[in-house]
Amino acid sequence: MGYNTSVTGRIEILPPLSWGQFKDSIFHENSDTWTDVVFDVEEVAFETDEGLMTRIQAIAVIPASEDGYKAYNIQEELQRLVNVFWPRHGFKGRLEGDGQDNGDMWRLYVNDETGAVYKVKAKIVWPEDEVDR
């Protein structure tokens, strides 16, 4: 069965990726390969002299599922994605994980200066001054 983590949040891609940049990526939701993160894809309609056209672009990186899943490699997979597009594209935002075990909470960020993906684990702190007596 395994250990499931609920992953939420989004990391914006600035500027968005064009269709040609991501259409063959394993991080596209239509890929046959499972990944812990996928692109959030948007279709934008615009008018030209030739008529109404549609532009497809990847605007963010999001969790692969709204349900809990085994996000064992999420940091490594996000780093693989960032490595392809950084520094031509920036990544702003975070993904948050909440595991099945109490206290297993973390956030993933992308360092804008280096393109490195890093994880920050939550710390649970008990206030010493508020002890029940």
Image: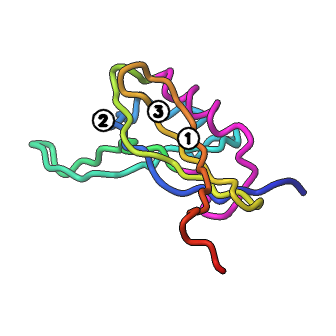
Where's residue 55, x and y in %? 30, 44
Look at the numbered disc 1 and give the secondary structure of its residue: strand
- Foreground residue among 41 and 3: 3
Q: Residue at x 30, y 35 (%)?
A: 14
Q: Quadrant of the C terminus?
A: bottom right
Which sits in the foreground, 47 or 25? Answer: 25
Determine the secondary structure under disc 2: strand
Badge 2: residue crowd in 10 Å (few <14, some 14–19, many ≥20): some
Q: Which residues are magenta?
A: 63-84
Q: Which sits in the foreground, 3 or 22?
A: 3
Residue 119, magenta (yes or no): no
Say if mark 3 contacts mark 1, CB within 8 Å: no
Residue 14 is marked as 2
Tell me the CA gap for discs 3 and 1. 28 Å
Q: Amino acid at mark 3?
A: Phe
Q: Residue furthest right?
A: 1
Q: Which amino acid type is shown beneath numbered disc 2?
A: Leu
Residue mark closest to the camera, 3 vs 1? 1
Which quadrant does the N terminus fall into? bottom right
Q: Is residue 64 visible?
A: no
Q: Is residue 107 above or below residue 1?
A: above
Query: What residue does disc 1 label?
Result: 120
Residue lying at the far front of the rendered structure: 133
Furthest residue toward bottom = 133
Task: Where is residue 27? Give x, y as percent.
Answer: 57, 38
Label of residue 22 in the image: 3
Q: Does the magenta run of residues contain 80?
A: yes
